[in-house]
Amino acid sequence: MKIAVVGGGSTYTPELVEGFARLLPEASLHLVDPAAERLAVVGPFARRLNPRVSWTTEPDEGLDGADIVVIQLRVGGQAARIHDETFPLRCGCVGQETTGAGGLAKAVRTVPVVLDIAERAARRAAPDAWIVNFTNPVGIVTRALLDAGHRAVGLCNVAIGFQRRFAELLGVPPEAVDLDHVGLNHLTWERAAYVDGIDRLPALMEKHLDDLATHVTLPAQVLSTLGSVPSYYLRYFYAHDAVVREETGRPTRAHEVAGIEAELLRLYADPALREKPPLLAKRGGAFYSEAAVGLITSLTRNDGGHHAVNVRNRGTLPFLPDDSVIEVTCAVDAEGATPCPVTPVGPMLSGLIGAVAAYEELAVAAAVHGGRSRVYSALLAHPLVGQHEQAEALADEVLA
């Protein structure tokens, strides 16, 4: 099996490579990245972790005959991320790279690049190849891929992180926990955690409420009221003004990651290094390799495994259009991902999901077709912006 990893020069790539070596050793990995200097450091280190690694700066070479195309891009690098996490603060809005104005700026930069890669993959990869998209904002990018007719599924590590967390608290293996994970990418809630068919989440919340609330950086009252555990990304909605106050005038997560990346590249360049350095754990993306390997295994081995992925709605959430892209637990086989049955979603969740889904539809239009009016419309629709004065000012920053 040939797996092309587009964006393979990422400092996070060794985590993915090590996971494939451990969990899917028959796969060969081909790293693709235009950043030759980074690739010249990451590639050799990745091969020391997994001998079935090669690398290239030529997309067509990396995509030729690929059975799976993993896309993990960051167009503009950490400098662009710093911009995305800071410019919204000047208008009193959250600065974040996947949602709000910062997420829209990232989408506008990223979607055209991803679509170009997907078109190349359609010509060069195996006829039945799957695109596994890990590029943020995952929901928007995946919708753009599906709208263009590509065989794609979006992947995020939030659900697998909660699965591991709940399993630890319950004292069971992670694979024993099946989540009722529902929402949109980075706008999800864990509404149940089934072990042997029994929902253990109510007991978990009763016993570990404060711990779970701390984990997602929200007041325990929010979790109690919801009756579920929200993703930590929901803090940008449920505690918006507090986050803005905390972020204003301080270094962003992007600044921190830029420093971590520089040190990781220095470490990777040492030819004696043959295992992941502990610093890599601070880079982010926990359990990404396990999530990616699990999904790819189900797509290629047709095992019907359950994975939380981004797919078309197609009636799963009846309050959304069929062509919306949602993130839910799915049964995955060689034909793709089929959402598992979802219990009714109440108004506390469906209202926010509906608003953000509408924004994402507008965001895809802005990213694919361009134009300031489309960017302004998407910002005006987003719950984290939603006012003319802010949308008008932020539109120029997004396009910049």
Image (tube, helix red, strand yellow):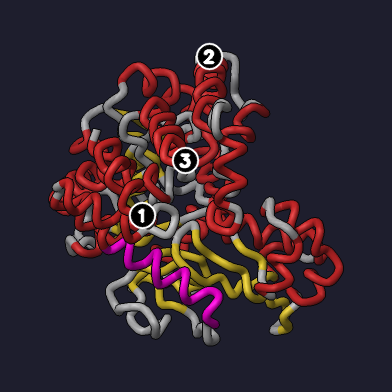
Q: Is residue 73 visible?
A: yes
- The answer to whether the residues at label 2 and label 1 have Cβ atoms under 8 Å apart is no
> Can you say whether 40 is above or below 297 in the image?
above
The residue carrying mark 1 is: 387
Three-letter amino acid code at the position of disc 1: Gln
Circle on res. 266: 2
How far across and down, in percent of the image, does residue 106 sit? 33, 42
| Label 3 CA crowd tier, 10 Å (few <14, some 14–19, many 20+) | many
Q: Residue at x 48, y 44 (%)?
A: 94
Sequence order check, earlier mark of 1 and 3: 3
| Label 2 CA crowd tier, 10 Å (few <14, some 14–19, many 20+) | few
Whether the magenta-drawn stretch holds residue 86 is answered as no
Range of residues picked out in magenta: 346-361
> Can you say whether 360 is above or below 17 in the image?
below
Three-letter amino acid code at the position of disc 3: Gly
The residue carrying mark 3 is: 95
Three-letter amino acid code at the position of disc 2: Arg
